[in-house]
């Protein structure tokens, strides 16, 4: 068993392959304390880490200093109002308006497997994969109980956390804050790593030394957001990709969140994560329960890279579900950047036919096919086909696309995918005119528009049912293989016409549950569907959405160079198989930059891979590279989708070049991608140190020369692996490295490294 209870010491020890997490029960009051989290220990006699022999002593010994004790003891799940002045995980308001709470140990159970969390996305594992500890605690005064749930993964350095709160008292209790996890640790000169950005600049990595007080990352936008990501890592000073301790916290949720590190007067850090308490108040009637979303905690003693690979394995095996969990995805072409709203059946079929000749396997019809949607100002909610654009209707178009034969690909017939934005309504729509109260709004106040649209109130079951029927009808009307589910605004003006006054604080969370309900129903009814989530690019790229869709659109910025930073930040947490990435036309629509077509392909290869351009209009030279690129995808996608990701160099840090590597689990095959962003005169070739190979095996190193002639001729570029087409031991490639020489800006090279038989 990877979880044990040492009854004598009253210590729980949770072990993953390389980490231990230890909890202690102390004093006659049964406080639950955090003892240790870090490299795996082989003993339980570490209760001294809670410093119970030092003042302020436990209250039973010296009740005089109860407040001081509560404010310094390393609490496993701190409550507010009685003396712990650090960030609390749980706060309540009783009917009489009081707030004090203290949750102390009652009993526990340990069992193989992992529970589901009602209505919530959650990592999963069977009895071989996982062991779970549930600690029941209670506030005797309020008869409020909480179950602290911990699941240990046997093969990964992952512990997941969630909390279930039950009201066993006679009167309602309002939960005004209920976070999912807390870890109180001594500071190890921690630095906080987090992801930030904006539309078209998602998930840039930030690192800062933590200081006294609170440093947090949060969203109050109703979705996880472009700006901040529901993730935080605490890394020891100077931790690198390969060295140093890293504690990662990732939230399996898609709404408001907070992740915070607080350094206190005793140089202890309290890390917390959960649903943001802003405008949150959940009414718990007698006998009712509330379950918090899950926090994934990862410990790595081998730097940031090991944390990334652990999360990738966790998400690939224990979060992503459905038909495409382990399957290669079709190469798609999306018409958004090709046509925006200006398309019809003929244009789409022309794109599909040309695409199929070049190995592209699916056409995705983006925004603009329904109602009178001629721009983003109208018609969301009117999900009937616009027959002026799609002459003959949706089924005719889909059938025609399905008749097209794909050359050079793995699919015979071209498939069809569709865009939807089911959560929204335009003021200029039949739906809004019929049901204005279905939009989230505060009575008597004109709601704020964003992209000229409102958000549907998915806390209302009748709205969820209506929206689902619309989705069901569309998906049943034709042979649709893929859905891009978009969400293009944040939540504001929080008010629901259906919730009573004392439940309005439930709306943010109920909305997220409504989204999960819709996507859950859709995937149950259409299990073969490939779902790609999207939110104005990558504003809802989070583990919660990944539970429903194996891939998420990373960003509306498809520029290969900007993508280096977006994809580096995203790949710090997510497997490459999850990152929606396309080759688009140049000058790029987001930044106006022109990059070689080959480089755009190399960068998109590190994601799901597809196209976002009008293939009938691009230059012949670019078009001639598409078939070789699709073949490149088929050559490498199994490796990219399933392999171990290593970050070799970061353009965000060095400002000149970027390099990453993917190595198969058996270490037989590896792919190195090197992108030179800016060329420099009079410099040596770059020395690149590979990672994750078998030191004793011999590898053959070859440069993949997709479109090299074009690159050389038209762009005056050379990219050369100086050590190319030779054999080296893994030891040499990792310790001594290889040389790469490039000329020209925005150039790239793909290097295949294969073990010799
Ligand atoms: C935002 C998405 O990120 C784009 O790819 C596109 O689908 C538009 N919405 C359509 O409105």
Image (tube, rainbow, N blue to C red):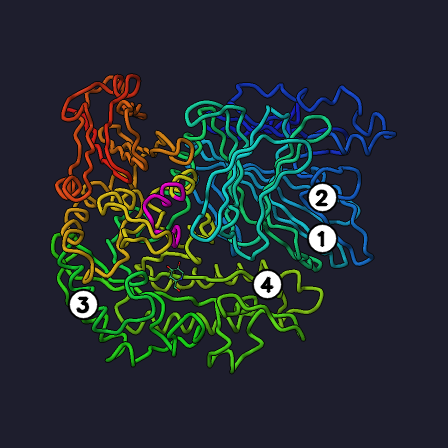
- Check disc 1 and report its element: helix, strand or loop: loop
Report the residue marked by disc 4: 492
Give the quarter the ligand 1 occupies.
bottom left
Residue extent of the magenta highlight? 553-566
Give the mark toward the camera: 1 or 3: 3
* Horizontal side, residue 7 vs residue 514: left or right: right
Pointer 1 local density, CA inside 10 Å: few below 14, some 14–19, many at least 20: many
- Check disc 4 and report its element: helix, strand or loop: loop
Give the residue drawn at x 24%, y 23%. 739
- Mark 2–mark 1 contact, CB under 8 Å? yes
The mark that comes first in sequence, 4 or 2, is 2
The mark that comes first in sequence, 2 or 1, is 2
Give the mark toward the camera: 1 or 4: 4
Looking at this view, name the residue that lies furthest to the front.
681
Q: In the rendered view of the protein, which quadrant contains the C terminus?
A: top left
Pointer 2 local density, CA inside 10 Å: few below 14, some 14–19, many at least 20: many
Q: Residue 589 lies in magenta, yes or no? A: no
Report the residue marked by disc 1: 168
Pointer 4 local density, CA inside 10 Å: few below 14, some 14–19, many at least 20: some
- Residue 272 visible at all: no
- Check disc 3 and report its element: helix, strand or loop: helix
Q: Residue 558 lies in magenta, yes or no? A: yes
The span from disc 4 to disc 2 (Cα, nearest Å) is: 36 Å
Residue 137, x across and y down, in percent: 68, 41
* Horizontal side, residue 158 vs residue 698: left or right: right
């Amino acid at each position: 068993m990877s979880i044990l209870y040492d009854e004598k010491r009253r210590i729980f020890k949770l072990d993953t392959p390389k980490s231990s997490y230890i909890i202690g029960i102390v004093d006659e009051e049964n406080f639950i304390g955090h003892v240790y989290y870090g490299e795996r220990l082989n003993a339980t006699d570490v209760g001294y880490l809670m410093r119970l022999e030092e003042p302020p002593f436990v209250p039973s010994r010296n009740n005089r200093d109860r407040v001081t004790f509560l404010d310094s003891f390393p609490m496993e799940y701190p409550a507010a109002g009685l003396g712990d002045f650090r960030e609390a995980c749980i706060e309540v308001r009783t009917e009489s308006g009081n707030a004090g709470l203290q949750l102390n140990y009652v009993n526990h159970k340990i069992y193989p497997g992992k529970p589901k969390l009602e209505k919530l996305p959650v990592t999963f594992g069977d009895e071989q994969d996982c062991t779970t500890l549930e600690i029941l605690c209670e506030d005797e005064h309020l008869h409020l109980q909480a179950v602290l749930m911990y699941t240990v993964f046997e093969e990964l350095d992952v512990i997941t956390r969630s909390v279930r709160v039950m009201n066993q008292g006679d009167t309602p209790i309002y939960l005004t804050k209920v976070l999912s996890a807390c870890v109180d640790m001594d500071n190890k000169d921690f630095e906080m790593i987090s992801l930030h950005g904006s539309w078209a600049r998602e998930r840039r990595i930030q690192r800062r030394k933590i200081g006294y007080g609170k440093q947090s990352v949060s969203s109050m936008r109703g979705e996880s957001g472009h700006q901040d990501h529901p993730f935080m890592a605490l890394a020891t000073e100077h931790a690198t990709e390969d060295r140093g301790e890293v504690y990662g916290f990732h939230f399996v949720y898609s709404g408001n969140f907070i992740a915070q590190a607080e350094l206190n007067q005793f140089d202890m850090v309290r890390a917390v994560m959960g649903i943001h308490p802003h405008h949150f108040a959940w009414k718990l009637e007698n006998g009712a329960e509330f379950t918090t979303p899950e926090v994934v905690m990862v410990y790595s003693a081998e730097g940031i890279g090991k944390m990334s690979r652990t999360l990738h394995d966790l998400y690939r095996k224990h979060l992503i579900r459905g038909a495409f969990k382990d399957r290669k995805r079709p190469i798609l072409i999306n018409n958004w950047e090709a046509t925006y709203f200006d398309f019809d059946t003929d244009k789409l079929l022309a794109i599909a036919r040309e695409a199929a000749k070049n190995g592209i396997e699916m056409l995705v019809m983006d925004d603009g096919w329904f109602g009178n949607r001629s721009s983003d100002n109208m018609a969301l909610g009117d999900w009937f086909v616009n027959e002026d654009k799609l002459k003959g209707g949706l089924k005719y178009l889909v059938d025609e696309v399905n008749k097209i034969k794909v050359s050079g690909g793995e699919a015979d017939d071209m498939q069809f995918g569709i865009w939807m934005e089911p959560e929204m309504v335009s003021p200029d729509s039949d739906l809004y005119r019929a049901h204005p109260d279905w939009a989230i709004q505060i009575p008597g106040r004109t709601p704020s528009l964003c992209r000229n649209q409102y958000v549907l109130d998915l806390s209302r079951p009748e709205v969820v049912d209506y929206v689902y029927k619309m989705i069901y009808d569309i998906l049943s009307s034709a042979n649709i293989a893929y859905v891009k589910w978009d969400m293009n605004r944040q939540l504001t003006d929080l008010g629901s016409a259906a919730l009573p006054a004392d439940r309005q604080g439930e709306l943010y969370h109920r909305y997220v549950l409504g989204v999960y309900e819709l996507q859950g129903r859709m995937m149950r009814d259409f299990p073969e569907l490939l779902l790609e989530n999207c939110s104005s690019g990558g504003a809802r790229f989070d583990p919660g959405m990944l539970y429903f869709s194996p891939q998420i659109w990373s960003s509306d910025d498809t520029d290969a160079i900007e993508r280096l930073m977006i994809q580096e930040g995203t790949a710090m947490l997510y497997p490459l198989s999850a990152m929606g990435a396309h080759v688009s036309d140049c000058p790029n629509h987001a930044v106006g930059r022109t990059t070689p077509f080959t480089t755009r392909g190399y960068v998109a290869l590190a994601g799901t891979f597809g196209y976002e351009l009008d293939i009938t209009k691009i230059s012949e030279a670019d078009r001639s590279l598409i078939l070789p690129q699709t073949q490149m995808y088929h050559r490498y996608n199994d490796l990219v989708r399933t392999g171990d990701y290593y970050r070799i160099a970061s353009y965000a840090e060095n400002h000149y070049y970027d390099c990453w590597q993917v190595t198969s689990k058996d270490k037989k095959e590896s792919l190195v991608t090197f992108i030179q962003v800016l060329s420099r005169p009079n410099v040596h070739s770059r020395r690149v140190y590979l990672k994750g190979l078998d030191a004793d095996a011999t590898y053959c190193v070859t440069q993949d020369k997709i479109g090299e002639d074009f690159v050389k001729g038209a762009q005056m570029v050379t990219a050369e692996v100086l050590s190319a087409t030779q054999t080296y031991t893994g030891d040499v490639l990792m310790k001594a490295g290889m040389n790469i020489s490039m000329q020209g800006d925005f150039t790239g090279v793909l290097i295949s490294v294969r073990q010799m038989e």
